[in-house]
Amino acid sequence: MRRVRFSVAMSLDGFIAGPNGESDWIVIDPDIDFGALFGQFDTLVMGRKTYEAAKKMGGGGSMPGMKAIVFSRSLSQADCPDATVSNDPKKLLTKMKRESGKDIWLFGGGELFHSLLSIGLVDTVEIALIPVLLGKGLPLLPAPVFGRKLELTKHQLYPKTGTVLLEYKVH
């Protein structure tokens, strides 16, 4: 069965983006094999805000080798020519998890993470803990926070940058 994996970089004080959505604080460790990481996914899901931020930076919903899905109640398919738009993540992701394929990457967006976690659709939380303190920004999990048990399944230290990868299974 395919998994929905929230894989994200986070500051030591719990933010996944700076106060204006910036990500320039994220260090890229030369020992992390991003090709191997990206090769584990064939689908990228994101919310409207993440999609629009990617468009502003000259990108969009697509990533090489991955199908892109944008969950939004306000965007239409015409707004996202490089992605599939859906307003029903529960129905679509439940169906996709049963289909064959690689894992599904929940990309960016603490709000979408919060929504999908609350309906039981997130299988793993994978955090690249970056040794920086931002002080404010977009939190990993926006309020209201609710309890969810996690089990540590993997951890790895990257000494060159001080980045720590943490992987948890969601119960």
Image (cartoon, rainbow, N blue to C red):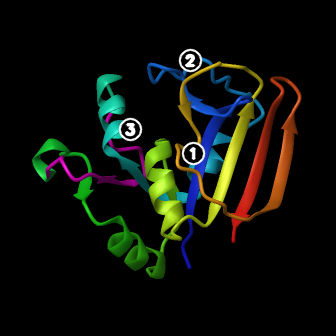
Q: Does the stretch in magenta take in 166?
A: no
Of callouts 3 and 1, the N-terminal one: 3
Q: Rate crowding at label 3 as few (under 14), some (14 to 19) or many (20 or more) other CA atoms within 10 Å.
A: many
Using the numbered discs, state the Cα–Cα distance from disc 2 to disc 1 in whole angstroms: 20 Å
What amino acid is found at the position of numbered circle 2 in the picture? Asp
Lateral position of residue 148 relative to residue 139, left or right: right
Lateral position of residue 34 relative to residue 20, left or right: right
Q: Please, which residue is most extreme toward the left here?
A: 78
Lateral position of residue 80 relative to residue 20, left or right: left
Q: Residue at x 25, y 61 (%)?
A: 87
Q: Rate crowding at label 2 as few (under 14), some (14 to 19) or many (20 or more) other CA atoms within 10 Å.
A: few
Q: Residue 48 in the image: x percent, y percent?
A: 30, 43
Using the numbered discs, state the Cα–Cα distance from disc 3 to disc 2 in whole angstroms: 16 Å
Lateral position of residue 111 relative to residue 171, left or right: left
Quadrant assignment, res 136: top right
Q: Which residue carries the number 3 mark? A: 50
Q: Nearer the viewer, residue 131 or 2?
A: 131
Q: Which residue carries the number 2 mark? A: 24
Q: Nearer the viewer, residue 106 or 62?
A: 106
Q: Which residue carries the number 1 mark? A: 141
Q: Residue at x 56, y 79 (%)?
A: 1
Q: Residue 169 in the image: x percent, y percent?
A: 71, 65
Q: Nearer the viewer, residue 12 or 8?
A: 12
Q: Residue 75 in the image: x percent, y percent?
A: 18, 47
- Which of the two discs, 3 and 1, sits closer to the camera? 1
Which label was assigned to residue 115? none
Q: Residue 153 in the image: x percent, y percent?
A: 81, 62
Quarter of the C terminus within the rendering: bottom right
Of callouts 3 and 2, the N-terminal one: 2
Q: Tell me the magenta residue range.
A: 60-76
